[in-house]
Image: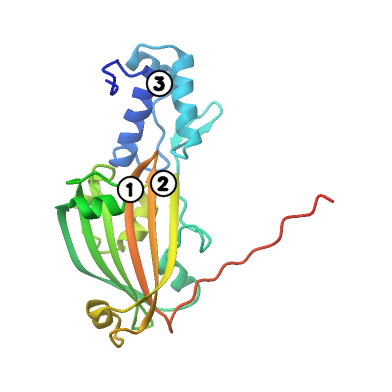
């Protein structure tokens, strides 16, 4: 039902059901979802209604439609520019560095009202809160403080993150449609200084990132780098002149 108490349009129900199966891991990247005629039979609707739902899902990057072959769960995009989504481990290894990570804490809890307001989430929403230390060439490289919304990514509740850090795991398993970055200078507090092996108050670069899927927050993360060990780099070219 919608907020007005009216039944949801069938194409919206199909969208939500398919999205839920992708987000909870029931349907994996590359897996074919039911053919259009199968969805027609399941929902008792027309081919036009099914086509409308699948077109919306394709536009959101959730599925890929292939002529005659059907529709498939889209592969999450991992490699991105610095102004999009960056994977610390992938970037370090690609540059020829040794990479490791440590999970320092991980617990399920509910957001308090103040934090929920700060990240535009619902108060008391259930989240997985993690702290992860990224290590490059045997030296602390970044401290990651992350929230994963369990209503959006329910399978994260049972993930141990023993083989992949949270960011890498999310990029490989959870599709996203929108992201926002904020980069700012901060001074290391006592906990950050201990984790990154640097003096308290030393300058750091903090990247705050929030990602959404279909206007629903997937994750919020703050990644802090020592100011003297890291730099953000972007490579750009001017648009071609039309003059």
Q: Which mark is residue 176?
A: 2
* Rendered residue at 26%/17% (across/down): 5
Q: Where is residue 235 in the image (x, y as percent from the top left)?
A: 61, 66
Residue tagged 3: 11
N-terminal of the pair, mark 2 or mark 3, is 3
Q: Earlier in the sequence, mark 2 or mark 1?
A: 2
Residue 66 locus on image (x, y percent): 54, 32
Give the x, y percent position of residue 124: 17, 46
Position of 180 relative to 87 (above/below) = above
User: At numbered mark 3, what does the secondary structure look like: helix, strand or loop?
Assistant: helix
Query: x, y percentage for residue 149?
Result: 26, 48
Q: Which mark is residue 43?
A: none
Q: Quadrant of the N terminus?
A: top left
Query: In the orientation shown, which residue stands out farthest toward the right?
Result: 243
In the image, what residue occupies the spot 39% across and 15% down? 40
Tag shown at residue 218: 1
Frontmost residue, 68 versus 143: 143
Q: How far apart are marks 2 and 1 (CA)?
A: 8 Å
Q: Is residue 113 left or right of residue 86?
A: left
Tell me if residue 159 can be seen. no
Instruction: Confirm whether residue 106 shows in the render.
Output: yes
**Image point (28%, 43%), residue name:** 152
Report if the CB atoms under discs 2 and 1 are less than 8 Å apart.
yes
| Separation (CA) of disc 2 from disc 3 | 21 Å
Circle 2 — which element?
Answer: loop
Circle 3 residues within 10 Å: few <14, some 14–19, many ≥20: many
């Amino acid at each position: 039902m919608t907020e007005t108490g009216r039944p949801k349009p069938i194409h919206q129900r199909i969208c939500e059901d398919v999205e839920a199966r992708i987000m909870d891991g029931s349907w994996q990247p590359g897996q074919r979802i039911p053919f259009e005629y199968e969805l027609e039979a399941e929902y008792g609707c027309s081919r036009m209604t099914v086509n409308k739902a699948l077109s919306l899902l394709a536009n959101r990057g959730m599925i890929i439609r292939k002529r005659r072959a059907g529709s498939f769960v889209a592969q999450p995009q991992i490699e991105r520019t610095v102004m999009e989504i960056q994977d610390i481990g992938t970037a370090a290894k690609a540059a020829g560095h040794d990479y490791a990570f440590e999970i320092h804490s991980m617990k399920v809890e509910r957001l308090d009202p103040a934090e929920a307001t700060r990240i535009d989430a619902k108060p008391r929403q259930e989240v997985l809160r993690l702290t992860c230390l990224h290590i490059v060439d045997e030296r602390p490289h970044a401290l990651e403080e992350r929230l994963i919304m369990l209503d959006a990514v329910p399978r994260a509740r049972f993930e141990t993150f023993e083989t992949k850090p949270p960011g890498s795991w999310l990029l490989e398993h959870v599709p996203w449609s929108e992201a926002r970055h904020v980069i700012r200078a901060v001074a290391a507090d006592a906990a950050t200084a201990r984790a990154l092996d640097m003096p308290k108050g030393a300058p750091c670069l903090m990247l705050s990132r929030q990602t959404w899927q279909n206007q629903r927050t997937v994750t919020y993360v703050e990644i802090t780098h020592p100011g003297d060990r890291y730099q953000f780099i972007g490579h750009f070219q001017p648009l071609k002149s039309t003059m």
